[in-house]
C-alpha cells in the first residue's frame, strides 16, 4: 500500500444537466519520500488536482488516502504551496511563517519559535527580508517566503502547485536548485505540478502526465532513472535525459492534437465550390481594343476565357 | 556609502508629508536641501504658485462682485469685512478669558491687576475725549456738506411740488367743467373721460418726477463721508474698550470670587459673634440659622466658576465633542454589525432592506424624531443622574452636557452609521479566497480566523468607511445644531442669522470657513489613520 493514494477520484462542476467533468477516474500512487511531478497543459485541472490532494475540495466519487486514512479536510500535514503565494500582505515574512508555526507547534516558547522561523527562512536564503512585508518583495522572494512557510510547518507531504511558473528563467533555476537541495537534506514526499517538462525531468523521480481537459485523467507514469545529483549543464548532453524529454514532449503534444481532433469546431465553414471565371457567359463583353488588352493583363490567362 | 544626516532629515520630512497627504510641499523641502533646484522651481511654479494665483483670483472676484449685490441683510460682505468679524470674535473670546482670570484672582495679584486696569481706564478716557472732539468736528463738516448738496435738490423738489399742485388744480377744474357741460347738455361723455384720463396721466407724471428727485436725495444722503465713518469707528472702538475695562474692574472688585467669599465670611463672623452673645432663645435661633446659611453660602461661593458667555472657540470645542461622541457611537454600532453581515449572508439579507430605506433619510428628520423619542428618557434634565454624572467629570463637564447635545449626537450617529456599516460588510465579505484557504490549511478556529485573517484583511475598507462617516457626521452636525439650538457652530450660525446685526452676514461666512477648515483637518486625520492600516499602497485620498 503506498503512502499517498488517489483511488478513482472524479470531480465535476455545474448543475446536473450541464455538468463539466474536470477530472474523471484519476488514479495515483505515491510512495513515501518520492518526488512525483505532474505535467499537463493549462486548464487541464492541475490546480483542482492539488486542491483535492490537499483536502480543500472533496471528490464526487472515489477517495484520497494518506497512509490508509481518507483525507476529508485540509491540515498542516499536507503542506500546500499555492500558485500565487498566498502570503498575508499585512504581516512581515517573519510573522507569516510564525503564524503557521504557531498553529502546528503551539507548545513552542517565544525563543524556540523565533529560532525555528529563522532556520527555515535561512534555508530558503531569505534572511535579509525577515522584517519586510510581501509588497516590498520581488516575485522570487515571495515564492521563497511561501516555501519557507510551508516547510516550517514540517508537513509530511509537500504539494507544490506550479511553484515556479510566475518567475523568470534565472530565478526559476535558482529555486529549482533550492527545492532539490532541501528535499535531499530532509527527504519528504513531494508532489509537484508543473508545465515545464525539463523542470520535471530535472527534479522528479516519476513524471505523471495529466491528459487534456475536460474529463482529464492521469496516464501511465514515466520513470526518471537519471542518477542524482543531476547537473543542469551536463544534463543536456545526457542521452537518457534527451530520450525521456522527447518522449514526454511528444506524448504531450499528441495529447493536444487528439484533443483538438476530438473537439467539434463550430467555426468551420464549408466554402463554396470555386470555379474559374468564364467570361463567355457574362452578359457584359469586354470591349475590343485597348480595354480588352487591359482586362487581359489583369486577369490570369490560365483561368480566364474570353470568347 | 552611509546616509548623511541631512539626507536622513530630508527623507523623514518627506515621509511625514507623504503620510499626511501634503505632498504638494515636497518641492519646497527638496529645494531647501538643494536637490535639483531647476526641477523643484518648475514644480513649485506649476503646483504651488499657479494654484495660489488662482485662489487670489477667486478672492478678487469675491471682492468685486460682493458689494454690487444688495440684500435685505445688508451688502454681501467682502473678504476684509469677514476678516474683521473673525478678529472681533477672537477679541471677544480673549476678553471673556480675561474676565474669567479676573474673577478668580485673589490677594496681591488682584490688587495689582485692579491698579493696572484703572490706569488703563484713565488713559483710554483721555483718548476717548480727544476722539469725540474730532467726531463732533467731522459731524459738523458733514452736515455742512450735506446741506450744501441737498439744498438745490430740495429747492427743485419744492418748486416741482408747487407746479404739480397747480397742474392738478387746473386739471380738476377742467374735469369739473366737463361734468358741468354734461349736466348742461353741451358736453360729451368722451370729452369727460378724456379729461379724467388727462388728469390721471398728469398726476402720475408729476409723482414720477417727484420720486425721481426724492431718489436722488436719498442717494446723496446715503453717501458715506469717509472721515466721519472712520472717526465713528475709532470712537466706537475706544468706547468699547473702556466699557470692557469697566467690566473688568467690576470683576476685580464686587463680582470677584475672593471678594464675595470674604464678604460672606465677614457676614458669617458677625452672625457667629451675635450667636455667641445671644441671650434670648429667639435671637439665638435666628443667629444660628443665619450662621448655617452663611456657612453654606461660603462653601458655594468658594467653588463657584465663572459663567462664560459662549465664544466661538468654546462652540468649536463643543461641536468637536459632539461629533466625536456621535462618530464613536456610530463606529461602535457599525463595525460589529458590519462584520456580522459580511460573515453571514442571512444577516446581510435581513439588514439590506433596513439599510436601503434608512440610508437616504435626511438628518433633519432624525433630529426631530430623536428630540421626541430620546427626550422622553429625560423628563427632568436638570436632576437626571446621567447628566449630573457627566457634568461632574473634569474635562468635559465644562462643556455643559445637556439633552440638546444628546439629540445632536444621536442624529450624527444615525446618519454616520450607514457608510461605515456598508463598507465594513463589503470589506469582510470580499476577502481573497487564498487567505481563506490559508486559514483552512492552518486549521484556524473561528475566533482566530476572525481576528488574524478576516479583520486585518478588511481594515482598509473599514477605515475608508469610517472616513466617509466622519465627513458625513460633521456635515450633519452643523445642521442638527442649527435646528436643535445645541451650543456649537450650528447654533452660532443660526443665532447670527436671527440676530440681524451689522456683522451677522460676515459672521455667517466666517463660520462657513471655520466649518470647512475643521472638516478638512478631520478628514486629514482619518487619511493618516487609513494610511497606517492599509497594506497595498493604494491611493487613499485626493
Image (cartoon, rainbow, N blue to C red):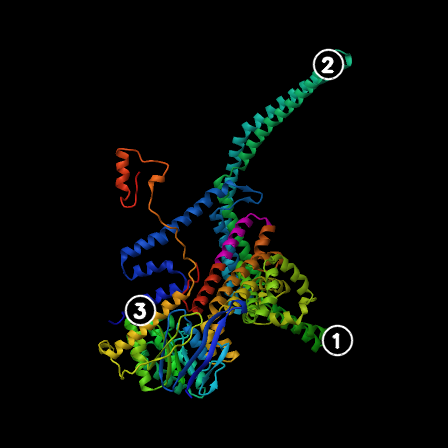
Q: Magenta stretch: give its range.
A: B499-517
* Secondary-structure class at tag 2: loop
Left or right placement of residue B57 versus residue B365 in this view: left
Choose the circle earlier in sequence order: 2 or 1.
Answer: 2
Horizontal and vertical percent position of residue B493: 57, 54
The residue beneath circle 1 is: B285
- Nearer to the camera, A297 or B302: A297
Choose the circle earlier in sequence order: 3 or 2.
Answer: 3
Query: Which of the two discs, 3 and 1, sits closer to the camera?
Result: 3
Left or right placement of residue B192 versus residue B516 in this view: right
The residue beneath circle 3 is: B8
As measured in the structure, the alpha-carbon distance from the residue carrying label 3 to the one carrying label 2 is: 107 Å
As measured in the structure, the alpha-carbon distance from the residue carrying label 2 to the one carrying label 1 is: 104 Å
Q: On residue A307, which mark appears?
A: none
Mark 1 crowd level (few <14, some 14–19, many ≥20, 10 Å Cα)? few
Mark 2 on the same chain as mark 1: yes
Chain under disc 1? B
Mark 3 on the same chain as mark 2: yes
Please tell me whether the stretch drawn in magenta is mainly helix, strand or loop: helix
Amino acid at each position: 500500500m503506498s503512502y499517498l493514494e488517489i483511488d478513482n477520484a472524479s470531480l465535476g462542476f455545474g448543475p446536473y444537466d450541464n455538468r463539466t467533468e474536470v477530472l474523471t477516474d484519476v488514479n495515483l500512487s505515491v510512495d513515501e519520500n518520492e518526488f512525483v511531478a505532474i505535467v499537463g497543459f493549462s486548464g487541464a485541472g492541475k490546480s483542482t488536482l492539488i486542491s483535492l490532494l490537499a483536502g480543500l475540495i472533496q471528490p464526487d466519487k472515489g477517495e484520497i488516502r494518506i497512509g490508509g486514512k481518507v483525507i476529508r479536510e485540509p491540515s498542516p500535514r499536507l503542506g500546500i504551496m499555492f500558485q500565487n503565494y498566498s502570503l498575508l500582505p499585512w504581516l512581515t515574512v517573519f510573522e507569516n511563517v510564525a503564524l503557521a508555526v504557531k498553529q502546528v507547534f503551539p507548545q513552542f516558547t517565544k525563543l524556540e519559535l523565533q529560532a525555528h522561523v529563522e532556520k527555515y527562512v535561512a534555508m530558503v536564503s531569505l534572511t535579509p527580508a525577515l522584517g519586510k512585508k510581501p509588497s516590498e518583495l520581488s516575485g522570487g522572494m515571495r515564492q521563497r517566503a511561501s516555501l519557507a512557510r510551508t516547510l516550517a510547518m514540517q508537513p509530511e507531504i509537500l504539494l507544490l502547485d506550479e511553484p515556479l511558473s510566475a518567475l523568470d528563467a534565472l530565478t526559476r533555476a535558482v529555486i529549482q536548485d533550492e527545492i532539490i537541495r532541501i528535499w535531499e537534506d530532509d527527504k519528504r514526499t513531494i508532489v509537484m505540478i508543473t508545465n515545464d517538462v525539463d523542470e520535471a525531468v530535472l527534479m522528479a523521480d516519476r513524471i505523471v502526465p495529466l491528459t487534456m481537459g475536460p474529463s482529464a485523467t492521469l496516464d501511465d507514469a514515466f520513470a526518471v532513472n537519471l542518477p542524482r545529483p543531476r547537473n543542469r549543464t551536463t544534463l543536456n548532453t545526457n542521452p537518457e535525459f534527451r530520450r525521456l524529454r522527447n518522449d514526454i514532449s511528444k506524448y504531450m503534444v499528441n495529447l493536444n492534437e487528439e484533443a483538438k481532433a476530438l473537439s467539434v469546431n463550430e467555426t468551420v465553414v464549408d466554402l463554396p465550390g470555386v470555379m474559374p471565371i468564364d467570361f463567355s457567359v457574362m452578359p457584359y463583353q469586354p470591349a475590343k481594343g485597348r480595354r480588352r488588352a487591359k482586362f487581359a493583363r489583369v486577369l490570369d490567362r490560365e483561368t480566364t476565357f474570353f470568347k | 556609502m552611509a546616509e548623511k544626516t541631512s539626507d536622513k532629515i530630508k527623507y523623514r520630512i518627506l515621509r511625514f508629508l507623504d503620510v499626511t497627504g501634503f505632498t504638494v510641499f515636497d518641492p519646497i523641502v527638496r529645494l531647501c536641501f538643494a536637490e535639483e533646484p531647476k526641477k523643484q522651481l518648475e514644480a513649485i511654479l506649476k503646483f504651488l504658485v499657479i494654484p495660489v494665483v488662482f485662489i487670489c483670483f477667486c478672492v478678487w472676484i469675491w471682492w468685486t462682485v460682493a458689494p454690487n449685490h444688495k440684500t435685505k441683510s445688508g451688502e454681501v460682505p467682502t473678504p476684509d469685512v469677514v476678516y474683521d468679524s473673525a478678529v472681533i470674535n477672537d477679541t471677544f473670546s480673549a476678553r471673556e478669558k480675561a474676565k474669567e482670570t479676573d474673577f478668580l484672582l485673589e490677594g496681591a495679584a488682584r490688587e495689582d491687576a485692579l491698579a493696572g486696569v484703572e490706569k488703563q481706564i484713565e488713559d483710554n478716557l483721555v483718548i476717548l475725549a480727544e476722539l469725540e472732539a474730532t467726531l463732533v468736528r467731522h459731524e459738523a463738516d458733514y452736515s455742512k456738506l450735506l446741506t450744501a448738496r441737498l439744498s438745490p435738490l430740495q429747492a427743485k423738489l419744492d418748486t416741482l411740488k408747487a407746479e404739480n399742485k397747480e397742474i392738478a388744480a387746473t386739471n380738476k377744474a377742467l374735469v369739473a367743467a366737463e361734468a358741468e357741460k354734461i349736466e348742461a347738455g353741451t358736453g360729451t361723455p368722451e370729452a369727460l373721460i378724456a379729461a379724467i384720463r388727462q388728469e390721471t396721466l398728469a398726476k402720475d407724471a408729476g409723482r414720477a418726477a417727484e420720486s425721481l428727485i426724492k431718489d436722488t436725495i436719498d442717494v446723496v444722503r446715503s453717501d458715506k463721508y469717509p472721515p466721519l465713518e472712520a472717526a465713528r469707528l475709532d470712537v466706537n472702538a475706544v468706547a468699547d474698550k473702556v466699557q470692557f475695562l469697566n467690566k473688568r474692574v467690576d470683576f476685580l472688585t464686587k463680582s470677584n470670587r475672593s471678594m464675595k467669599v470674604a464678604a460672606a465670611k465677614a457676614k458669617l463672623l458677625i452672625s457667629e459673634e451675635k450667636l455667641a452673645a445671644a441671650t434670648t432663645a429667639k435671637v439665638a435661633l435666628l443667629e444660628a440659622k443665619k450662621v448655617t446659611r452663611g456657612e453654606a453660602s461660603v462653601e458655594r461661593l468658594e467653588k463657584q466658576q465663572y459663567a462664560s458667555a459662549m465664544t466661538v472657540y468654546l462652540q468649536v470645542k463643543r461641536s468637536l465633542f459632539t461629533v466625536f461622541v456621535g462618530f464613536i457611537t456610530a463606529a461602535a454600532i457599525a463595525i460589529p454589525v458590519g462584520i456580522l453581515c459580511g460573515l453571514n449572508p442571512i444577516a446581510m439579507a435581513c439588514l439590506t432592506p433596513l439599510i436601503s430605506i434608512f440610508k437616504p433619510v435626511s438628518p433633519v428628520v432624525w433630529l426631530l424624531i430623536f428630540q421626541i423619542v430620546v427626550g422622553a428618557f429625560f423628563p427632568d434634565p436638570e436632576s437626571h443622574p446621567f447628566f449630573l454624572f457627566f457634568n461632574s467629570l473634569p474635562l468635559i463637564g465644562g462643556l455643559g452636557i445637556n439633552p440638546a447635545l444628546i439629540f445632536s449626537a444621536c442624529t450624527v450617529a444615525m446618519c454616520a452609521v450607514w457608510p461605515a456599516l456598508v463598507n465594513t460588510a463589503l470589506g469582510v465579505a470580499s476577502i481573497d479566497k487564498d487567505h481563506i484557504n490559508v486559514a483552512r490549511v492552518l486549521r484556524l478556529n473561528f475566533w482566530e480566523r476572525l481576528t488574524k485573517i478576516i479583520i486585518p484583511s478588511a481594515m482598509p475598507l473599514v477605515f475608508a468607511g469610517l472616513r466617509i462617516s466622519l465627513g458625513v457626521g460633521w456635515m450633519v452636525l452643523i445642521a442638527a445644531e442649527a435646528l436643535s439650538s445645541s451650543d456649537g457652530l450650528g447654533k452660532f450660525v443660526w443665532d447670527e442669522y436671527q440676530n440681524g446685526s451689522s456683522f451677522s452676514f460676515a459672521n455667517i461666512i466666517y463660520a462657513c470657513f471655520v466649518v470647512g477648515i475643521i472638516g478638512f483637518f478631520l478628514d486629514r486625520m482619518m487619511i493618516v489613520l487609513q494610511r497606517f492600516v492599509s497594506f497595498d499602497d493604494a491611493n487613499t485620498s485626493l
